[in-house]
Image (tube, helix red, strand yellow):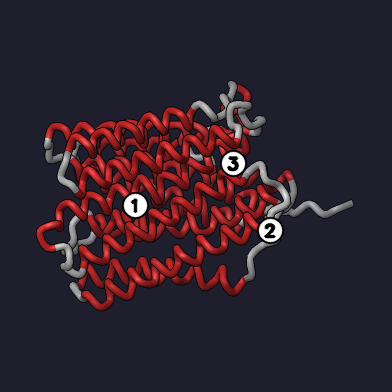
Amino acid sequence: MAAPVTAVLPHDTGTWLPLHLLLVGALLSAISGATQLLAVTWSSSPAPADGIVAAQRWSVVLGALGVATGREVDLDAVTGAGALLLGIGLVLLGAILLGIRRRSSVDRFHPAIETYVVAVGFGVVGIAMGAAIAAGAAGDWWGRLRAAHLAVNVLGLVGLVVAGTLPYFVATQARVKMSRRARPARVRAGTAVLAGATVLAAGGHLLDRPGIAAAGLLGYAAGLVAVATTLPVPGRRQFRWAGPRLVQLGVGGLWWLAMVVALAVVRLTDATTEGRVLAALAVGGFAQILVASLAYLGPVLRGGGHQRLTAGFATTASWPGLALANVAAVALLVDWRTAAVVAAGLWALDTGWRGVRLLTDHGSVERPR
C-alpha cells in the first residue's frame, strides 16, 4: 500500500521511493514468507524455529524502512543501517532455507529451494552494491554500479525466486498435475541459465559494454521461455475455476518477458526509457504475479473447510483489479503518469479491500464430524 501512496505524495527521490517500497518492502517481505512456507510444505520438513523466523522477518521490514527513510531524508547512517539489516535478513533467509532442505523428507522439490538460495546470494550482492551507491563510494562508477545493482536485484533476487516457484505453484493454482517436463534436472538447468544471464547482464553494466549487457538480458529472456516450457497448460475448466488470478499470473509472466526484452533494446539503442520499462516490469510483471499468488494463498492460509475456501477465492477474485493493474503498467510504459497513479491507486484499494474482507469474514467454519 505504501508504494502507490508515495507515488502520489511529494518527495525528493522521484520514482526511486515507490519502486523500492514495492520491490524491497513488499516483494522481499513476500519472498521471505512464501519461500519458507513453500519449502516446508513441499519438502515435508519441520518448520524453522519461531525466533529465527521473526528475526528474519523484522530484519527485512526494518531494513526496507531504514533504506527508504535514510535515502529520502539524506541520512547515510540510516540508509547504511537499513542496508545492513536487509543483508542480515537475507543471510538468515538463506540459512533457514538450507536448514529446511537438510531436514526435508521429500527431495522432489529441492530444485526450488536451491533456486531460492541462489536468489538470496544475488540479493546479498545487490544490497552491498546499493549500500555503496547510497554512501557515495561508487565514484565515477556510480552509473555502472547502479545498472548492475538493478540487474542483480530485479533479475537475480526477485526473478529467480519467481522462476523457481512457477513450475510447482502454477499446478497448484490451476489444480492440475505438474508438467512432466518439470523434471529436477530441467528446473535446475533453467535456474543455471537465468543465473548465468544475470551475471552476464550485470557484468556488461559494470564494464560499460552495452552489447554484453543486452546479450545477458536476451539470454535471460530465453531462460524465461525455457521455464515456461516446464509449466502445466491449464484448460478451459481450470480458467473457469481459477478466474482472474490465473489470468493475472499468466499476464504478469508475459509482462516480465516483454520488459526484459525491452531492457535489452534500451541497452542497444541507448534510449532514455529504462526507468519507464523498469516501472512497467515492477507493476505489470512482478506486482501482478504477487497479487495473483496472494489471491490463492490468502484463502488457503485462512482455512476453515471447503465452503470457506470457496468463499475466500470468490472474495479475492477481481477482474477490475486485473484490468487496473494492466492499465497502470501500460500508462507507466508510455509515461502517462496521472493515469498510472490513478490506476495503481485504485488497484491497491481494490486489493486492500478484498484483503480486509478476507480477514474479517468470520463466516461459518466447518467442524469435523
**Measuring 18% from the left and 61% from the top, which residue is drawn there?**
13
- Where is 202 relative to 234, above or below? below
**Measuring 57% from the left and 40% from the top, which residue is drawn there?**
169
Measure the C-alpha gap from mark 1 to mark 3. Answer: 34 Å
Q: Earlier in the sequence, mark 2 or mark 1?
A: 2
Farthest residue toward the bottom? Answer: 77
Whether the residues at callouts 1 and 3 have beta carbons within 8 Å, the answer is no
Residue 103's disc is: 2
Q: Earlier in the sequence, mark 2 or mark 3?
A: 2
- Where is 221 relative to 121, above or below? above
Q: Quadrant of residue 178?
A: top right
Measure the C-alpha gap from mark 2 to mark 1. Answer: 29 Å
- Where is 260 relative to 369, above or below? above
| Residue of label 3 | 314
Task: Using residue 179 as the reference point, say whether residue 258 is left or right of it.
Answer: left
Farthest residue toward the left? Answer: 140
